Image: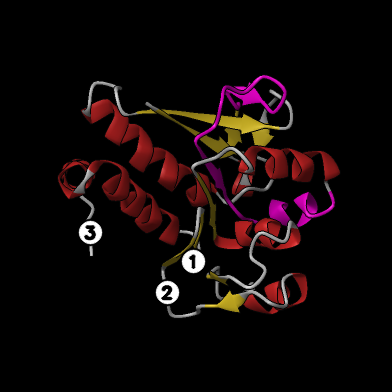
Amino acid sequence: MRNVAILLFDDVEVLDFAGPFEVFSVTAELNNYNLLNVFTVAEQQANIIAKNGLTVLPKFSISNTPKIDVLVIPGGDGAKKLLDNEVILNWINTIHKSTEITMSVCSGATILGKLGLLNGQPYCTHHQVYERMGKLASTAMAQKDKRYVAAGKVYTSGGISAGIDLSFHLVAQFFGKAVAQKTAQYMEYRLS
């Protein structure tokens, strides 16, 4: 059983977190909740106002979250503010040391860049974020034609919907293509 934690923060892009949440949680559901435990986490266990006004209550705060095997860092306008949030940056840095996978979606890559986790590594992100990434992580190697990229245990995905593709990739990596296909069929999603 792997614990999948999805970080939430104000102005998070909805599909950046909801897409991976759906892929991982449907995989869990279709397999009697024996494969994955999926939950949300934020700095505080209080309402998060996502992009365009969606209100979400995270299940855990960073102070009471269970062990995290897979950490999902979404993007959105709120990711810019996280670059100056030492509490969250320190927490991510600490959690990353013990994760199996740390993944970003869209501009969530900027947080990985700020922490130095992409130095000398290939990555991808939203097409409008590459210029900013060049300043944050000048030695990171942009892969602008990729939907997702793996660099050791750090995975990055392109903009918004690409997080769904990366999530399916991880389901297949963890549990095999048949499990990923079963989830995709249920979700009526075409795997490439």
Label 2 to label 3: alpha-carbon separation: 15 Å
Q: Please, is residue 30 above or below residue 72 in the view?
A: above
Instruction: Give the mark, 3 or 1, whose residue is nearer the N terminus.
Output: 1
Give 178 or 190, whichever is nearer the viewer: 178
Badge 2: how crowded within 10 Å, few (<14), some, or many (20+)? some
Label 3 to label 1: alpha-carbon separation: 16 Å
Label 2 to label 1: alpha-carbon separation: 7 Å
Q: Please, is residue 111 above or below residue 87 in the view?
A: below
Residue sitting at x 21%, y 58%? 190
Q: Residue 86: percent from the left, percent from the top? A: 84, 44
Determine whether, in the image, residue 68 is placed left or right of residue 45: left
Q: Residue 175: percent from the left, percent from the top? A: 25, 41
Tell me which amino acid carries mark 2.
Answer: Lys
Numbered circle sitting on residue 158: 1
Q: Which residue bears the numbered disc 2?
A: 146
Instruction: Give the mark, 2 or 3, whose residue is nearer the N terminus.
Output: 2
Q: Which residue bears the numbered disc 3?
A: 191
Q: Secondary structure at mark 3?
A: loop
Q: Residue 60: percent from the left, percent from the top? A: 62, 23
Mark 2 near mark 1, Cβ–Cβ under 8 Å?
yes
First to last magenta residue range: 57-84
Quadrant of image for the N terminus: top left
Residue 161 in view in this figure: no
